[in-house]
Image (spheres, helix red, strand yellow):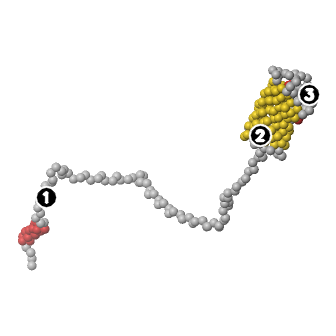
Amino acid sequence: MRKRPEIVAPIAALILVAGPASAQPNLPPPPPPPIDQPTELPSLPPPPRPQTPSSQSPPPSPAPPPRRVAPPPPAPYRASARLARTDEVVYVEAPASHPVAVTLNPIGLLRGRLSANLEVQLEPHHSLVVSPNVLVFHADRGEPGSLLSEGFGFATPTSSSVGIEFGYHYWWRWSRELRGPFLGPALLLGSTTDAAAGDPTRAQSYWGLAVDVGWQEVLPGGFTAGVGVGLEIVRMAGSGGPVPRFLLQMGWSF
């Protein structure tokens, strides 16, 4: 069957016009834009800048995985080198204590005078001393008015006398013994017969003051010896003056 060109052309044009129209549905018109809001669309971000090959840095190399270290082998058991703490009581022996000394004065014995010392330590540095004396026999004690006669209580070769001294000693060292350097005053009291001053027919009393300085040593067994010098003033019946004195003492400490 042969188609006629004058019929086919109008039919084809009609199909082309009717086909798209039938494919689109009847849609309502778009709503109006809201009031008080801009109708412009948001701006899009700018495109990324192209990187040149020189500005591109190589990606970082991945970190190597951590290396596992094998634990050291267990050490063999050893006993602790530290010694255990122990409490030990140590007894320290205190130095020997000799707070009492009994000594004799041999110098005066050459002139007929017997004299002794009893010294008691009250506490370290301080002691009291008592020294009784007596004339036990006749001896040369110098001329009347001499220093030796006055020092013995104005005694003459035929005098008899009894006396006592009360003294205090300060010891330079801190010690429980009567040892080391010392100094101190003393009070002298006594009575003398046939004296070189006053009335020789009767016993007369005298008094005096003295200051001594010396050194005394105590050996480990207790033997004690000391030396010293001093100055005394003895008064009897308005007479008297300063008299030097010399100390030499020997005895024992307890």
Question: How far is disc 3 from disc 1 in space, using C-alphas?
Answer: 166 Å
Tell me the mark number nearer the camera, choosing from 3 and 1: 3
How many numbered callouts?
3
The quarter of the picture where residue 176 lies is top right
Which residue is most to the top? 238
Q: Secondary structure at mark 3?
A: loop
The quarter of the picture where residue 171 lies is top right
Q: Residues within 10 Å of mark 1 (few under 14, many from 20)?
A: few
Mark 2, residue position: 120
Q: Answer left or right for 171 relative to 103.
A: left
Q: Answer left or right for 141 relative to 47.
A: right
Q: Secondary structure at mark 2?
A: strand
Q: Please state the horizontal and vertical placement of residue 134, each as a whole percent of the image.
A: 86, 33
Label annotation for residue 158:
3
Q: What amino acid type is highlighted by mark number 3?
A: Thr
Question: Does residue 81 appear in the picture of this structure?
Answer: yes
